[in-house]
Image: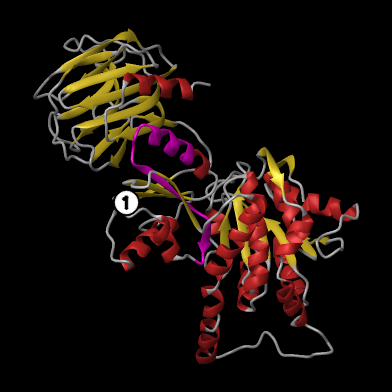
Amino acid sequence: MPKQMKTIDGNTAAAHVAYALSDVATIYPITPSSPIGEIADEWAATGRRNIFDQTMTVRQLQSEAGAAAAVHGSLAAGALTTTFTASQGLLLMIPNMFKMSGELLPAVLHVTARAVAAHALSIFGDHQDVMAVRQTGFALLASASVQEVMDLGLVAHLSAIETSVPFLHFFDGFRTSHEIQKIEMIDYEDMAKLVNMEAVAAFRARGANPERPELRGTAQNPDIYFQGREACNPYYLKVPGAVSDYMKKVGELTGRAYQLFDYVGHPQAENIIVSMGSSCETIEEVVNHLGKSGDKVGLVKVRLYRPFSVPHLLAAMPETAARITVLDRTKEPGSPGEPLYLDICTAYMESRKTPLILNGRYGSINRAAHFAGGRVRAALPDLGSRYSVELWFWNGMPSDARAVTGYMFSRGVDQAKGAPGDHLGIGGTHESTNAVGKLFFYNGDELEEVLVGKTDIELRTWNHVVLVRDGDQVTVYLNGQPEPEIAGRATPGCPADLAQVFLGGRSDNLFNFEGKLDELAVYNRALTAQEAAAHFAAARP
């Protein structure tokens, strides 16, 4: 069919695919997945036909638990069935999810990944709900954009039919579910050509039927139950291959290639981020930008999260990877690390490979960190004597309130006497610095070398600053100006191999920052004035 471009959101893309490949949808509304069910119900009411030349049967239940139970019952009767949910709604489906996977029923759940209400309710994107069901036996497939919701949603349905393993296709709530983009639609006729109709017929044939009575849902002792649980292994071992095959087929149809783990970046990258979901689009832009400067950085996008295929991960990862940062969009209190991080660690441990693997955690909403006397400590190895720190800051402390208004960045040993190290802050009333309301650089009480800026920092305004340490040379750029705000020589106050930095405070916890920090980046090289100006221009609203 000729390509058709259409402007839609992520929820509509999911509904387009789910309607095409399902006989039944049992639904219950929950933000931000509610529009998927509404759209499917509207299409059914107007007589829209799916690939089986029938209208979808759409029924609203009394809760997500009832919707999941109806999905299970409908599948058991031989009808391809789907539902749409998020957050606590997905958690209410867990008991029936175990049943569906245990009985090898090809359900497909489309989930707008959302935070689970903990200390408070949040309706925005997070991966807490998805991570809470990874033990249910559902395959987990992640999309990062509206176009991917269309493409990989199709892969999820095709793979579930092929393997008899149920799939949970997820994409970030609001960030993708409600994002409006112009994408390429996939026609129902083209979808139909990809469906294994023999597998569909086999699934329908094993549906519950009074003409063919059978016993289901028995109670078993541990010896038999254990064997039954292990008996599913061959089905799950086939899932990565089946998903990969359908990714290739969808790619041949659309011209958009997908892998279980997609890599972008320098072919000999040393610093690599691993992430999944909508963050991948932003990270990819940064990787491409840094690649133009010769930085050996890369990104691995996780598509198929469960079953987790270690061979496919290692095949995607460059052999040169020395430092891997794994980003999780969830919080698992009490764990040594979040789920994706632990999976990556396990994969490398069992492969007897030992790159440095770091865990990062990011939230559901982009918000500047507000400091009120506290500070953040971070481990950043291999900075050496040439590095750059870039950030936006908003100072809320009057410059005449105390000796030093506040330190935004510090590199030094925690609580070391005299704070030897590299410290960037805003001056106060201290006479020796003569830096009231101006940026200044200080390398500790022993060396006592101070470099002072020229510009008065206006209270409660956002400013962009880049600190560059290149051996003994220190340069600071402010708000994209080509001329340095600070330029001079200052002896390094800490060892070049020190891997500890502080944000929002000094290494000895003195004169911590009162204000906001945002969009911080650390580089293990010296940024140029042109790069600092370009970054400032790119980030301005």
* Count of number-bearing discs: 1
Q: Would you name the residue on which mark 1 appears?
A: 321
Quarter location, residue 494: top left
Tell me: residue 475, above or below residue 325. above
Q: Residue furthest left?
A: 446
- Colouring scheme, one of rainbow, by chain, secondary structure, one colour: secondary structure
Q: Residue furthest right?
A: 46
Note whether residue 235 is visible.
yes
Q: Nearer the viewer, residue 190 or 24?
A: 190
Note whether residue 96 is visible.
no
The 10 Å Cα crowd at callout 1, few under 14, some 14 to 19, many 20 or more, is many
Q: Left or right: 56 with respect to 257?
A: right
Residue at left offset 73%, top offset 51%: 186
Could you say where residue 192 lies in the image, as x and y percent from the top left? 76, 62
Q: Nearer the viewer, residue 511 or 249?
A: 249
Could you say where residue 476 lies in the image, as x and y percent from the top left? 28, 19
Q: Left or right: 342 with respect to 67?
A: left
- Amino acid under label 1? Ala
Tell me: residue 413, above or below residue 247. above
Q: Left or right: 24 with respect to 532?
A: right
Tell me: residue 530, above or below residue 102. above
SS assignment at label 1: loop
Give the magenta-colored segment's residue range. Answer: 283-307
Could you say where residue 266 lies in the image, as x and y percent from the top left? 38, 43
**Residue 456 highlighted magenta (yes or no):** no
